[in-house]
């Protein structure tokens, strides 16, 4: 049993639906990351139930404690924040306006705590932006204001965190993933359908920008080297530059996929009677040459056409150590493709039969 499920099982049944809904349903921040439960005090029979929520924000993990009172289970919980200044001077009017799920607590709604956490995070973001703007002469404050003047970026696309000597911006990049080819993601535990690209920038050392990709985009795009952000550069120029870099990379992948599928389609049409199986990246074809039956396996890499297809010959009759004999062909020419295959098949046939190759002849029959 995982720690989170162990914590859930220890919570009083009257409060368990609130926490279960948070853990299963609530995803916060630009990363859309799930909430973590760190610890709990007070078991099922305790008067007070207290637990700590670990909430994603910028590159940080906010740790907020939630306290329920079993003697008054219909009351809203109390909160203890890891930043003592957050909501320290909040008045009732502000809370009623910004955190209605908490001020008008509905104890019969299992999603009540989800709503309150989401509203408090929004208020926390406003609090951080206010801290940033308190020093309106700072470089980070200027960068934030200028960035929001760019049509690509809105307030909803940026998370701000202000520390003692550092300011962080987490920025959502507007990448177009709607036409990306479908990929298998069996090995990914995190939902691969969230196609998110984020840029993390810290001031005063803004040159160390970091790119954060969702599992899906990380698998599709591979390693991305960010352009250098010069000390004199500004975010309002750098964000569109990185966005264009990603969108161009995505477009290249889409174009390569189209060329790959066109190549396979041409082979399938030309050798329709020889097709054993095929998908979007490979095909297996059965041929005979001078009574020698063989299979041509064509595997097309994701980097095609920069990287040529991998061609493998397999014998239908001959085996080695219990497996069909095969030969991987290298440096396959784009021109005179059939003549090259015919030559290699004749050599391969003689290798299978243990005969020294002579002058290769033959044609491909399907």
Image (cartoon, grey):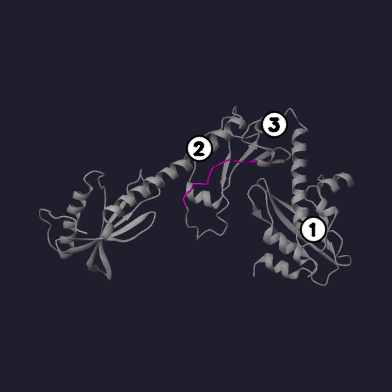
Q: Quadrant of residue 349?
A: bottom left
**Compared with residue 198, is residue 271 higher up or lower down, i.e. above or below?**
below
Residue appearing at x 12%, y 59% in the figure: 356
Q: Is residue 11 left or right of residue 275?
A: right
**Quadrant in which the N terminus is drawn:** bottom right
Q: Callout 2: few (<14), some (14-19), or many (20+) C-alpha neighbours within 10 Å?
A: some
Q: Earlier in the sequence, mark 3 or mark 2?
A: 3
Please state the horizontal and vertical placement of residue 280, each as a whole percent of the image: 39, 54
Say whether residue 178 is magenta: yes
- Residue 91 seen from this side: no
The reply to whether discs 1 and 3 touch (Cβ–Cβ < 8 Å) is no
Q: Which mark is residue 145?
A: 3
Q: Is residue 346 left or right of residue 199?
A: left
**Majority secondary structure of magenta residues:** loop
Q: Most extreme residue toward the bottom, as rendered? A: 45
In three-dimensional space, the C-alpha distance between marks 1 and 3, rounded to whole angstroms, equals 34 Å
Give the magenta part as a residue range: 170-181
Q: Which mark is residue 245?
A: 2
Residue at which label 1 appears = 66
Q: Earlier in the sequence, mark 1 or mark 3?
A: 1
**Quadrant in which the C terminus is drawn:** bottom left
Q: Earlier in the sequence, mark 2 or mark 1?
A: 1
Q: Nearer the viewer, mark 2 or mark 1?
A: 2
């Amino acid at each position: 049993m995982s720690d989170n499920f162990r914590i859930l099982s220890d919570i009083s049944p009257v409060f368990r639906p609130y926490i279960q809904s948070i853990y299963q349903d609530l995803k916060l921040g630009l990363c859309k990351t799930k909430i973590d439960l760190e610890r709990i005090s007070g078991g099922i029979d305790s008067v007070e139930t207290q637990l700590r929520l670990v909430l994603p924000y910028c590159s940080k993990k906010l740790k907020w404690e939630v306290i329920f009172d079993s003697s008054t289970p219909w009351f809203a919980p109390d909160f203890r924040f890891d930043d003592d200044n957050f909501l320290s001077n909040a008045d009732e009017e502000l809370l009623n306006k910004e955190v209605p799920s908490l001020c008008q607590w509905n104890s019969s709604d299992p999603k009540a705590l989800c709503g309150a956490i989401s509203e408090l995070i929004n208020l926390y973001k406003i609090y951080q932006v206010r801290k940033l703007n308190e020093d309106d002469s700072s470089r980070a404050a200027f960068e934030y204001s200028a960035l929001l003047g760019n049509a690509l970026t809105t307030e909803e696309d940026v998370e701000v965190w202000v520390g003692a000597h550092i300011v962080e911006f987490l920025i959502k990049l507007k990448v177009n993933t709607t036409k990306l080819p479908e990929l298998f993601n069996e090995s990914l535990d995190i939902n691969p359908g969230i196609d998110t690209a984020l840029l993390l920038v810290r001031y005063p050392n803004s040159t160390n920008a970091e790119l954060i990709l969702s599992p899906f985009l990380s698998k599709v795009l591979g390693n991305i080297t960010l352009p250098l952000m010069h000390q004199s550069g500004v975010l309002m120029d750098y964000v569109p530059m990185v966005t264009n870099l990603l969108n161009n990379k995505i477009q290249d992948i889409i174009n390569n996929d189209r060329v790959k599928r066109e190549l396979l389609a041409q082979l399938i049409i030309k050798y329709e009677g020889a097709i054993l199986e095929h998908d979007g990246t490979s095909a297996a074809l059965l041929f005979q040459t001078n009574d020698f039956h063989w299979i041509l396996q064509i595997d097309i890499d994701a980097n095609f056409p920069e990287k040529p297809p991998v061609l493998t010959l397999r014998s239908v009759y001959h085996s080695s150590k219990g497996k069909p004999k095969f030969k991987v062909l290298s440096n396959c020419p784009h021109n005179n493709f059939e003549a090259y295959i015919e030559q290699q098949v004749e050599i391969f046939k003689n290798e299978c039969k243990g005969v020294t190759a002579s002058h290769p002849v033959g044609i491909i029959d399907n």
